[in-house]
Image (spheres, helix red, strand yellow):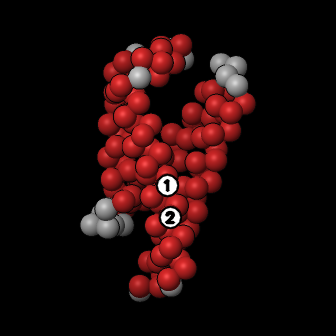
């Protein structure tokens, strides 16, 4: 049980920290804004995605949130990361920009697996 908790909190904290950092860059970095423009998105989408990332990261981190809302956060992040990888590939970005979201998808998957294991152990 202790190992499961350690793996869960390590992966969840790492993933959430990355999403919070990413979201903050959506609001503060002109380069990120330019990247969204290059991909054909308006500023409203960048702002919406930044807010959604912040909320999702908090949902994953705060134990108060349980059940369906946490599942939706995991699903939303999964869709976002897969979409980011596909989008970066489609516009010819460097391999690092294509692979990074998939690495974080792997970390998210480990977090989800160990969240489920913790739920099963508590039941």
SS for callout 1: helix
Residue placed under numbered mark 1 in the picture: 14
Count neighbours of disc 1 (C-alpha within 10 A) and say few if under 14, some if 14 to 19, many if 20 or more: some
Q: Quadrant of residue 30?
A: top left
- Would you place residue 35 above or below residue 26 in this image? above
13 sits to left or right of 114: left
Q: Is residue 21 visible?
A: yes
Quarter of the figure with the C terminus:
bottom left
Which residue is disc 2 drawn over? 10
Q: Is residue 41 visible?
A: no
| Disc assigned to residue 104 | none
Instruction: Name the spot of residue 80 as percent of width and height, x first.
Output: 51, 39
Find residue 106 and report its horizontal and vertical position in percent: 62, 54
Residue at figure coordinates x 31%, y 62% from the top left: 62
Position of 24 with respect to 76 (left or right) is left
Foreground pick, 54 / 21 = 21
Residue 111 image position (x, y, % from top left): 52, 63
């Amino acid at each position: 049980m202790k190992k499961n908790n350690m793996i869960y909190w390590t992966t969840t904290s790492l993933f959430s920290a990355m999403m919070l950092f990413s979201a903050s860059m959506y609001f503060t970095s002109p380069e990120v804004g330019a990247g969204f423009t290059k991909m054909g998105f308006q500023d409203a989408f960048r702002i919406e995605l930044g807010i959604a990332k912040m909320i999702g990261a908090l949902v994953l981190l705060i134990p108060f949130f349980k059940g369906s809302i946490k599942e939706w956060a995991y699903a939303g992040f999964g869709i976002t990361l897969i979409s980011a990888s596909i989008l970066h590939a489609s516009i010819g970005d460097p391999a690092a920009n294509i692979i990074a979201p998939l690495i974080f998808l792997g970390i998210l998957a480990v977090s989800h697996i160990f969240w489920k294991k913790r739920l099963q152990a508590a039941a």
